[in-house]
Image (cartoon, helix red, strand yellow):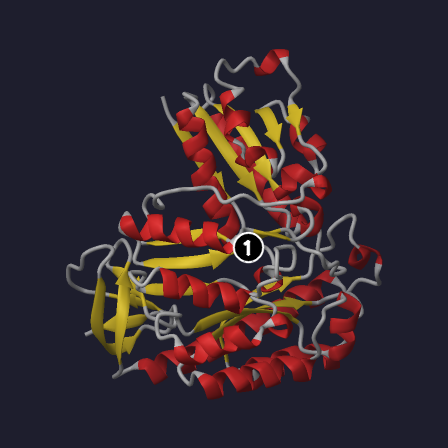
């Protein structure tokens, strides 16, 4: 009897996969493989389908349940696959009763698709878990959904509108994780800088971060996942400046460095806004390390426009770059815009990655000789406060935080003394 989960996509999916696996096991399900999909690009959906076919070949007796954003926006795509036993929506997958209802697995006698209108969901409940199996850091969902409609993005239709987990519930979840041994917690969601707009009093993300650190003093390290810098509030900036347990690493949803492209994406910031934010944060926290998402080859992007995305890597002092070659997502406005030739898109993505590799190398060189507190993961590796990977030659204990002298690097990771 086993329940396995194959997870694609974001940190929120990782958190939800943990909760689903526990629901399924509590329901007594066995020989089940849950595929938690991502819909951020067409390639992500295609990858999920390929994975489903591979799983079916390797484990023909297992029943495959498909859920996640791709299942939410394209349920018929997965329902038409003979390898799939059932398709479950993003709201339904987080309900214990959904999994309990499959205890006898009378799926063949019921509807194959259980996907309802995600836009009708008005709140997000905390899903209590006491740890993350096989992981040294735990993820906590504080928000779900998105009220914005970027022209390239299908995710609001997979996740629904923005809704927040009440602060008290977040505090209790983090306290439980710490009591069960978690030393680092990552706050995650779809658009976490929109946190609190739907809650009484409309508390902002910074308010919640400060409250969490105050009420769970035992928590050693707190991280924030991807943020929209234009929505960063004063309390969040104050926490960045003054809360040493808030780790000096922010992943920014930049997407582009050219104002016209940002407007065509319907982003809420311009180039100068992003640069000013990074400069402000660096003044407040000089050791801050930035990551960022950048799309290469967005529709109508000229070489001159693209050059501004290259330049913003240096201007925002970016270190960890996530590069996405633009892929038209059916159902989005960007898919109907004049497209950039695929060979140009691929070439620009390559150049952006090379720029990112150079930025990372500069960061690695700057870390040599410093002492960092490294949270040890599996296989003799860990991460610094700034989320840079460190490799150890000798034995280290998973889950420990080790003061480490950085002796060198291999071009990709730091090397411990």
Left or right, 7 with reference to 191 = left
Instruction: In this rendered view, identify the residue nearer to me: 181 or 235.
Output: 235
> Of residues 402 and 261, which is closer to you in this image?
402
Vertical placement of residue 73 versus 347, above or below:
above
Residue found 15% across the figure and 63% down from its top: 394
Q: Which of the 4 quarters of the picture holds residue 390?
A: bottom left
In the image, 179 versus 268, the foreground residue is 179
Q: The N terminus lies in which quarter of the figure? A: top left
Whether residue 386 is visible: yes
- 50 to 135, vertically: above or below: above
Residue at the (66%, 81%) spot, across then down: 273
Residue 183 picture location, percent across and down: 30, 58
The vertical placement of 41 against 285, above or below, is above
Q: Which residue is mark 1?
A: 189
The spot of residue 361 in percent (x, y) is 41, 78
- Across and down, in percent, residue 271 comes to 68, 81
Residue extending furthest toward the left: 395
**Which quadrant would residue 297 be assigned to in this image?**
bottom right
Binning the other alpha carbons within 10 Å of mark 1 as few (below 14), some (14 to 19) or many (20 upward) gives many
Residue 194 image position (x, y, % from top left)? 62, 62
How many numbered tags mark residues here? 1
The residue tagged with tag 1: helix, strand or loop?
Answer: loop
Quadrant assignment for the C terminus:
bottom left
Residue 321 visible, this orientation: no
349 versus 182 height, above or below = below
């Amino acid at each position: 009897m086993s329940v396995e989960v194959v997870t694609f996509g974001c940190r929120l999916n990782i958190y939800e996969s943990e909760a689903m696996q526990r629901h399924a096991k509590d329901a007594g399900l066995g020989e089940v493989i849950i595929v938690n999909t991502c819909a951020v690009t067409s390639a992500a959906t295609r990858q999920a389908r390929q994975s489903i076919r591979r799983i079916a070949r390797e484990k023909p007796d297992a029943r495959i349940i498909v859920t996640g954003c791709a299942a939410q926006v394209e349920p018929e795509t997965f329902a038409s696959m003979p390898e799939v036993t059932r398709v479950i929506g993003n709201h339904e997958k987080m309900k214990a009763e959904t999994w309990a209802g499959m205890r006898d697995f009378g799926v063949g006698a019921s509807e194959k698709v259980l996907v309802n209108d995600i836009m009708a969901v008005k709140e997000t409940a905390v899903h209590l878990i006491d740890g993350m199996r096989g992981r040294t850091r735990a993820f906590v969902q504080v928000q779900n959904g998105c009220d914005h409609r970027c022209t390239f993005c299908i995710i609001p239709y997979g996740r629904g509108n923005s809704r927040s987990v009440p602060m008290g519930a977040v505090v209790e979840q983090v306290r439980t994780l710490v009591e069960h041994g978690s030393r680092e917690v990552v706050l995650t969601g779809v658009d976490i800088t929109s946190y609190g707009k739907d809650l009484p009093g409309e508390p902002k993300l910074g308010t919640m971060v400060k409250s969490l650190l105050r009420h769970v003093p035992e928590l050693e390290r707190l991280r924030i996942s991807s943020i929209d810098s234009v929505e960063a509030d004063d309390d969040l900036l104050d926490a960045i400046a003054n809360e040493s347990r808030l780790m000096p690493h922010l992943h920014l949803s930049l997407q582009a460095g050219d104002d016209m492209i940002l407007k065509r994406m319907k982003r809420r910031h311009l180039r100068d806004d992003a640069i000013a934010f990074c400069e402000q944060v660096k003044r407040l926290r000089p050791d801050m390390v930035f990551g960022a998402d950048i799309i290469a080859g967005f529709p109508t992007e000229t070489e001159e426009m693209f050059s501004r995305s290259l330049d913003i890597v240096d201007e925002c002092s970016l270190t960890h770059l996530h590069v996405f070659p633009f892929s038209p997502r059916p159902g989005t406005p960007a898919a109907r815009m004049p497209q950039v030739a695929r060979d140009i898109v691929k070439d620009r993505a390559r150049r952006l990655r090379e720029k990112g590799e150079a930025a990372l190398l500069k960061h690695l060189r700057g870390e040599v000789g410093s002492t960092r507190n490294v949270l040890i993961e599996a296989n003799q590796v860990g991460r610094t406060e700034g989320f840079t990977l460190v490799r150890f030659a000798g034995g280290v204990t998973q889950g420990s935080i080790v003061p480490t002298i950085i002796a060198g690097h291999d071009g990709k990771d730091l090397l411990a003394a």
